[in-house]
Amino acid sequence: MSNLSLNLVASARKYPDKVALRCNDQEFTFTEFDAAAARVATFLDREEIAAGDRVGLMLPNTPAFALAFYGILRSGAIAVPMNPLLKSREIEFYLSNTGATALFATPTFAAEAAAAAAAAGAKCWLVDDADLVRLTADLPEQASPVDRADTDTAVVLHTSGTTGRPKGAELTHGGLDRNQDVAANTLIEVGPDDVVMGCLPLFHVFGLTCGLNTSVSAGATLTLIPRFDPHTAIEVIERDAVTVFEGVPTMFSALLGETRRFPSSATASLRVCVSGGASLPVQVLTDFERMFGATILEGYGLSETSPVASFNHPHRERKPGSIGTPVEGVEMRIVDLMGHEVPQGELGEIQIRGHNVMKGYWNLPEATASALSADGWFSTGDVGKVDEDGYFYIVDRKKDLIIRGGFNVYPREIEEVLYEHPVVVEAAVVGLPHDSLGEEIGAAVVLEVGAHVDPAELRDFVKQRVAAYKYPRRVWIVDSLPKGATGKILRREVTVPTTESAK
């Protein structure tokens, strides 16, 4: 029996009175968490949701998400998490694509959720934390989780859909359980004395595995923030004595900007931070560790890999800028366009094989066959290299590669240089159409609050540090950059000024 929800059952027995979930002044012990999830499972059974049925989950980072998620798993159904900010046509697609028969949704966006559920022919339950408790309060607790096999699908997570419509990655009970176990025990080393900050969206695989599932399994407290804000985050770190912070690079940058408003004692409880979701600029890592006194361990993964594939392991050499070495039970390699492994130091596509890799894309056999080889290698679409010690480095996404006059330029390399400038907070390098070169290089830059710098100065700053064909000919200053649900910068959505004022 491999139902992922058994980890909650085990922790409730081992740490019955310990706080499992905290959100502002609301708390659930492990006993209360497990009991609530068991009542949700009973509720689903009475609503004729059977094992293998899909149930949408459109809730923010509050206890309701965790209770509903583990209730869905416990019932044997498949969870389909989604961003609460989605519009009705997007919600309808997620529901229809998976054949979901029901949806738990936040009342905050009731109209969008209800309309989508009706269009998809699914039941819709609008619940916040109190509503979910009331909805199931009079129901008995399901005796035990429904039997599931390691290979049974537990979650369908839709990819971001950078090309065409989102694809639903099928993640299994066994894969998710092994991935959280490796993350909790050999990477982050989370234990019952830890307090983990849950500011990453739980509907995203990073927050789901490294935040929720690892905390449940390890008996740690997960303190939730419905929406990330750097000021609030530091207040909660101080209030709850948070020991583990997990975030994407833009969150680390935002926290750095708040340091002058708080004494160093406010974050003294932090012992380790985990960065993922995108490459962390080396300068941000260095500055953060100096200011916060906590080690950052950078890892790498995707929705299709549950997500953790590689990590800068604790107690081993850490190489800033590297995504580390493959985690236990996972293999990685670099291949050329023909699928042949390339020598150390040469660029190619990163491929992954192991317990963490998805079963496939829901109802998309051709897309699955394109991404997964017959012998289990998943093609990530990321360009990288591996050094003589087996440490991997991401250079960029294949789709983000800029080809300027026949020369390959990887945006991340140029962004790293921009981050070295003392007033640059965020940067996104993009390709611009060019009649003779094919593409020219542009850079959108966010500065520190109150800072001023001429775009030409930034252009020259990079020009002095990279080959002549690499530096951005156009640089423009912006107030903010477009970001996805986790805070990852979305290069594809960067707006390019139409005037020549951006030099």
Image (spheres, helix red, strand yellow):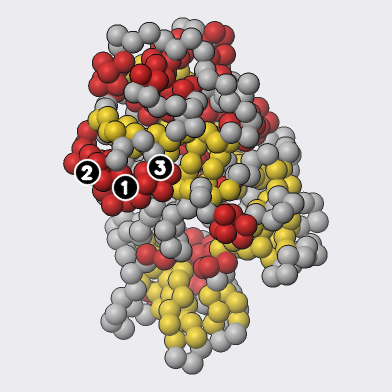
Q: Earlier in the sequence, mark 2 or mark 3?
A: 3
Work out whether 367 lies above or below 357: below
Q: Position of residue 302 (x, y in %)?
A: 56, 48
Task: Name the foreground residue: 3 vs 240.
Answer: 3
State the separation of the CA atoms marked 1 and 3.
Answer: 10 Å
Task: Report crowding for label 2: few under 14, some 14 to 19, many 20 or more residues within 10 A (C-alpha).
Answer: some
Q: Amino acid at mark 1?
A: Glu
Return the residue at label 1.
92
Task: Report crowding for label 1: few under 14, some 14 to 19, many 20 or more residues within 10 A (C-alpha).
Answer: many
State the separation of the CA atoms marked 2 and 1.
Answer: 8 Å
Q: Position of residue 237 (x, y in %)?
A: 41, 29
Q: Position of residue 247 (x, y in %)?
A: 47, 41
**Which residue occupies 62% across, 24% down?**
2
Return the residue at label 3.
99
**Which residue occupies 60% across, 85% down?**
406
Relative side of 369 to 76, left or right: right
Q: Amino acid at mark 3?
A: Gly
**Which residue occupies 31% across, 15% down?**
136
Work out whether 195 lies above or below 228: above
Quadrant in which the C terminus appears: bottom left
Q: Are marks 2 and 1 in contact (CB under 8 Å)?
A: yes
State the separation of the CA atoms marked 2 and 3.
Answer: 16 Å
